[in-house]
Image (cartoon, rainbow, N blue to C red):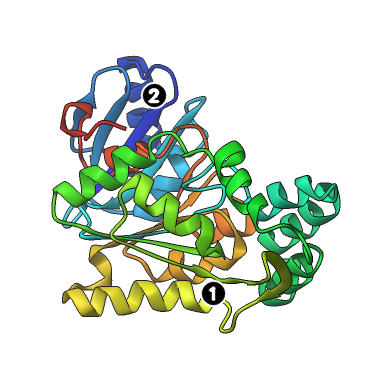
């Protein structure tokens, strides 16, 4: 049995659910019933077969509504591996650092291309960091204080999953100076990120090896699951960029969050309209079950 979870940005009506049920019926995917997670917000539809067909049928059917289709068994995950920039926080930290140096447009253009998969991540990262050479180390603290904002729903997602026994990992192609703090603010068990090299109070324009990129993210998922004695089907991965694709593909549920097209195409599910609490609905948690965000 499979579950299609419909999550509305604003309001989900009984009429909307009937529309979804009719669409499934026309696609020869008769629903076996509905179950509201939160009235007017999120609802599960039970589907006996055809998860991919159900996803294609339901996505875009109801305006501003996200759809996640997955197996009924094991929907509550025991491992979360998440990207940081533009996923757990609202910004790309390297772009914000570049803004203090007056080169945000130049750096952000490279960031966007790398996240779309048009540039190799490692080379693009080294190129951008080189442009920050001689920046005062104090700007890192200033950037964190002034620019880094936690994504809505992030705390609720991580803290609810941890309360329910899940292990949570923040893995970022960004920098430890931000990732360590963000992980603590949100409540992650562990953070993995790149280290900016600094000398005499200034950025050297280099990143310590090895680079945390796509392969590291995938290995973080696989190795964390193995250490915990979990199958990959018990894992949830979420990210937005091309360097997140390997971990998204490896996870039991791999989610593209407001992602670049290539990442969205590779994911098992997409969140385009809601905040990160959509991933709690996807696991069958009603609002009354959430930890405060």
Image location (x, y in percent) of residue 14? 30, 16
Image location (x, y in percent) of residue 148? 55, 42
Residue on which the image places disc 1: 212
Q: Nearer the viewer, residue 108 or 143?
A: 143
Q: Is residue 47 visible?
A: no
Residue name at image x 30 percent, y 38 percent: 156
Residue name at image x 56 percent, y 63 percent: 175
Q: Secondary structure at mark 2?
A: helix
Residue on which the image places disc 2: 19
The quarter of the picture where residue 279 lies is top left
Q: Quadrant of the image for the C terminus?
A: top left
Residue name at image x 49 percent, y 31 percent: 61
Disc 1 crowd rating (10 Å Cα; few below 14, some 14-19, many 20+) is many
Q: Is residue 75 visible?
A: yes
Badge number at residue 225? none
Image location (x, y in percent) of residue 97? 70, 51
Instruction: Calculate the distance from the C-alpha at mark 1 to the C-alpha at mark 2.
Output: 44 Å
Q: Is residue 143 left or right of residue 276?
A: right
| Above or below for 244 versus 187 | below
Q: Secondary structure at mark 1?
A: loop
């Amino acid at each position: 049995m499979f579950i299609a979870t419909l999550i509305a940005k604003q309001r989900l009506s009984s009429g909307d659910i009937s529309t979804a049920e009719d669409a499934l019926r026309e696609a020869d995917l008769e629903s076996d019933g509905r179950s509201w997670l939160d009235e007017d917000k999120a609802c599960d539809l039970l589907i006996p077969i055809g998860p991919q067909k159900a996803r294609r049928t339901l996505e875009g059917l109801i305006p501003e509504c996200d759809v996640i289709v997955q197996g009924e068994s094991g929907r509550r995950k025991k491992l979360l591996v998440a990207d940081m920039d533009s996923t757990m926080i609202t910004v790309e930290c390297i772009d914000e650092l570049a803004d203090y140096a007056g080169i945000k447009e130049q750096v952000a253009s490279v960031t966007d291309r790398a996240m779309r998969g048009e540039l190799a991540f490692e080379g693009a990262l080294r190129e951008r960091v080189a442009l920050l050479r001689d920046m005062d180390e104090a700007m890192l603290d200033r950037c964190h204080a002034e620019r880094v904002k936690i994504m809505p729903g992030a705390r609720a997602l991580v803290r609810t999953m941890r309360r329910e026994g899940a292990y949570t990992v923040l893995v970022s192609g960004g920098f430890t100076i931000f990732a360590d703090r963000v992980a603590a603010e949100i409540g992650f068990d562990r953070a993995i990120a790149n280290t900016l090299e600094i000398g005499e109070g200034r950025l050297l324009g280099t990143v310590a090896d090895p680079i945390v990129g796509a392969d590291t993210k995938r290995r973080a998922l696989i190795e964390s699951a193995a250490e915990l004695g979990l199958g990959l089907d018990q894992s949830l991965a979420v990210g937005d960029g091309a360097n997140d694709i390997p971990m998204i593909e490896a996870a039991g549920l791999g989610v593209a969050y407001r992602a670049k097209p290539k990442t969205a195409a590779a994911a098992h599910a997409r969140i385009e309209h809601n905040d990160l609490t959509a991933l709690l609905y996807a696991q069958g948690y009603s609002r009354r079950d959430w930890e405060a965000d």
